[in-house]
Image (spheres, rainbow, N blue to C red):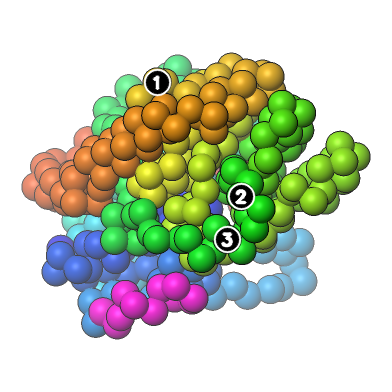
Amino acid sequence: MNIGITCYPTYGGSGVIATELGKSLAERGHRVHFITYALPMRLTGPGHEEAGYLDNIFYHEVEMSTYPLFEFPLYSMALTSAMVEVARFEKLDIIHAHYAIPHATSAVLAKQILQRSPDAKSRDIKIVTTLHGTDITLVGLEPSFEPLMKFSIESSDAVTAVSHFLRDETIDNYDVEKEIEVIPNFIDTESFRPIDSKHLRRLLAPNGEKLLVHTSNFREVKRVKDAIRALKLILDKGVKTKLLLIGDGPDRGECQALARELGIWQQTRFLGKQSELASVLSASDVFLIPSGNESFGLAALEAMACGVPVVSSDVGGLPEVNIDGETGFVVPVGDVEALAERTFQILEDRDLHSKLSKGAFGRSTGEFAKEQIVPMYEALYERTIGGESSNDSQSFDREAELAYEIVTPA
């Protein structure tokens, strides 16, 4: 198949999954075209050179132009034009849009343009949309975007969600009748696996401290401060512990200030963005993810694949990934005492840690390995290409016109 993929190329779960999916599809013999404004991070950069050069992966940059007339950049329109061009000249079978707004919106508009093309191949292009979370639970709930979100989902030829929670949220919030298939996120077990990190552990914990770890983009919804407060409670119990915080974002400064205020700055290490995550995860004892909302929890899955038990909040798709009592523990969101207590139990009970570590590794590498998940996308593509779309040859109705007005400045 000839597959176009559009995603955010930045440091985040949706971009990671989209890029890893594209790489896996290319390894399985498909031609993959990334259409986005920058080269996806997982296609290049430290730690990824070993993937090597694949002559069936292509990158098409969305070129942005600035004009005095337009106060805001018209990325959605530029993306649509890029999709049309790539689809025509590369004879794409599928455009896989990761995120409904703006990617699926642009893809649907591109499809409608291509349906008027004299090239029969271009007219047959199918749109697959994967919902990752923020597009549904945050962006799409803005009243001005609601009709655009509903239109983009229902106009796609196939729609997937990364968790049952997200599928149900989408149906409830937008009253869509479109079938949404759950295809969970996945991991590359060659990249995320238990690694001998004794040397790194000696550097991070020279006095034999226990190591907690958290990775995120340091946004408010990640509740990183809860992890820092939990560390304080564990230290108060007399357990020598350090907390490793990986990533960066708008809340990092406040988190650093909180660690100083609580007097635990020396036990808190802000490591920034790290390319060699598996090594740090493998050196750690427990992974903390106290988020206020997670549609899936890819960071938790990566830790589990390295054999690290997880203590997570009970929101969104996290309980679908982290099974309470089997791979770690699930606690009420915002309950710092419960977060600290469950973490303390794992740190203090070697047998419990061993049991949860084995459970985490087994679940992540069994149910969520790319060898299990990528064929699910292949099968979906084949069904979509082989079947008739309920949206083929439809012109804009009033809802589509409204959607177009929303993304086009006056």
* Residue 323, quarter of picture: top left
Secondary structure at badge 1 equals loop
Who comes first in sequence, dot 3 or dot 2?
3
Q: Residues within 10 Å of mark 2 (few under 14, many from 20)?
A: few
Q: Which residue is mark 1?
A: 325
The amino acid pointed to by label 1 is Gly
Q: Name the residue furthest front.
A: 207
Estimate the spatial distance between the alpha carbons at disc 1 and disc 2, rounded to whole Å: 26 Å
Measuring from the top left, give residue 39's x and y in whole percent.
Answer: 48, 73
Q: Is residue 198 above or below residue 215?
A: below
Residue at 57%, 37% in the rendered image: 288
Secondary structure at badge 2 equals loop
Q: Which residue is mark 3?
A: 202
Q: Is residue 103 above or below residue 357?
A: below
For residue 165, side relative to residue 74 (left or right): left
Q: Which mark is residue 208?
A: 2
Secondary structure at badge 3 equals helix
Q: Which mark is residue 62?
A: none
Is residue 374 among the parts visible in the rendering? yes
Q: Which residues are magenta?
A: 44-54
The prevailing secondary structure element of the residues shown in magenta is: loop
* Residue 196, quarter of picture: bottom left
Measuring from the top left, give residue 168's x and y in whole percent.
Answer: 40, 21
Measuring from the top left, give residue 286's x and y in whole percent.
Answer: 52, 39
Q: Nearer the viewer, mark 1 or mark 3?
A: 3
Q: Name the residue furthest left.
A: 386
For residue 115, side relative to residue 236 (left or right): left
Estimate the spatial distance between the alpha carbons at disc 3 and disc 2, rounded to whole Å: 8 Å
